[in-house]
Image (cartoon, grey):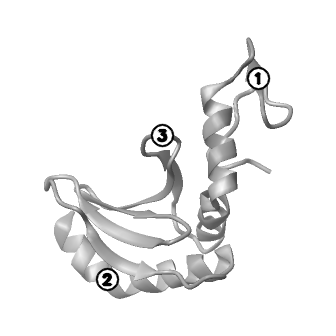
């Protein structure tokens, strides 16, 4: 099984240390697993949605879903927001997840939002 984001070719187990320090790629993978974004991205992929995981600073991980040339959704354990590349905004909150919801339920809720807003997102492209 491929992890999202992928570990490096030398990965054997977390923490994957190189010269006493974790390799960046494996640190991102581990942080994503710990924060639940790997699991949400995996579930989205099972639903046919192209999802990646991005490191947004300080090993804060977000599921990334491209919604057009100039727009994307960032999601994490808490919820999801829509952003536009050409605007310097805080993003539009799309949904907040209830605690505890499984990654599968979170992915299904995101898919429902994507299906509902598909026309709106296509206008941004």
Relative placement, left or right, of 74 versus 105 is left
* Outermost residue, left side: 87
x and y percentages locating residue 50 in the rendered image? 51, 61
Which of the marked residues, 1 or 3, is nearer the chain's N terminus?
1
Question: Vertically, is 83 above or below 55?
Answer: below
Residue for badge 1: 17
Q: Which residue is identified by label 3?
A: 58
Label count reads 3
Q: Nearer the viewer, mark 1 or mark 2?
A: 1
Q: Mark 1 to mark 2: distance in Å?
A: 43 Å
Q: Name the outermost residue toward the top.
A: 19
Q: Circle 2 — which element?
A: helix
Quadrant position of the C terminus in the picture:
bottom left
The disc at residue 117 is 2
73 sits left or right of 31 in the view: left
Q: Compared with residue 17, is residue 87 higher up or lower down, i.e. above or below?
A: below
Residue under the point 75% across and 16% down: 20
Q: Earlier in the sequence, mark 3 or mark 2?
A: 3
Relative to 26, does residue 100 appear above or below in the rendering?
below
Helix, strand or loop status at disc 1: strand
Residue 120 at x, y percent in the picture: 23, 79
Residue in the image at 45% along x and 80% along y: 96
């Amino acid at each position: 099984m491929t992890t999202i984001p992928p570990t490096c070719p030398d990965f054997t187990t977390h923490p994957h240390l190189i010269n006493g320090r974790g390799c960046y790629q494996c640190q991102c993978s581990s942080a994503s697993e710990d924060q639940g974004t790997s699991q949400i991205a995996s579930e989205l992929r099972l639903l046919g949605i192209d999802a990646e995981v991005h490191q947004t600073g300080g090993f804060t991980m977000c599921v990334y879903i491209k919604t057009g040339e100039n727009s994307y959704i960032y999601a994490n354990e808490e919820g999801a927001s829509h952003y536009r590349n050409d605007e310097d905004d805080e993003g539009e909150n799309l949904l907040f997840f209830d605690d505890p919801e499984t990654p599968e339920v979170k992915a299904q809720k995101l898919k429902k939002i994507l299906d509902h807003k598909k026309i709106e997102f296509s206008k941004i492209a």
